[in-house]
Amino acid sequence: MLAYDDFTPSNISKKPSPYWRRNGAEAADLLTAAAHDYERCSSAAPFDRAVYGDLRKAGGEKYAQICALAYRQCLAANKLVADANGSRFCSK
């Protein structure tokens, strides 16, 4: 399992923290939570198959592949951050 820890240097006090750190979590905690939630999160496979099937019907196999890639790129391009109170989040 791999993780990218985008930490805030101590000399930059205004930079918001990643949302997953809002309760003081460390990278090891993130990996532990991911391992614990793997089964629950992998249950999205039926949804993925249904969406992919709809895309294939709408435009063919190549269209479905491009849309699936674009969806993943859009999700990966976002970062959720917590405010100073750790209670709200916004996309960065």
Image (spheres, grey):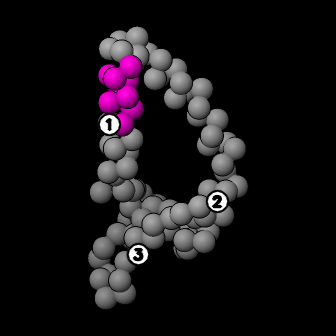
Q: Residue at x 54, y 71 (%)?
A: 27
Residue type marked 1: Ala
Residue placed farthest to the bottom in the image?
11
- Residue 70, numbered label: 1
Residue plotted at (67% across, 57% down): 35
Q: Position of residue 6 (x, y in %)?
A: 40, 70
Which residues make up the magenta segment? Answer: 61-69
Q: Residue furthest top?
A: 57
Q: Are marks 3 and 2 in contact (CB under 8 Å)?
A: no
* Residue pointed to by mark 2: 33
State yes or no: residue 67 in magenta: yes
Residue 84: give x, y in percent of width and height. 39, 70
Q: Are marks 2 and 1 in contact (CB under 8 Å)?
A: no
Please, is residue 17 above or below residue 9 in the view? above
Q: Amino acid at mark 3?
A: Phe
Q: Is residue 9 left or right of residue 3?
A: left
Residue 30, image x, y percentages: 58, 64
* Kind of residue at badge 2: Ala
Q: Is residue 31 left or right of residue 60?
A: right
- Residue 30 included in the magenta stretch of the image: no
Looking at the image, is 51 positioned above or below residue 21?
above
Residue 7: mark in rendering:
3
**Quadrant of image for the N terminus:** bottom right
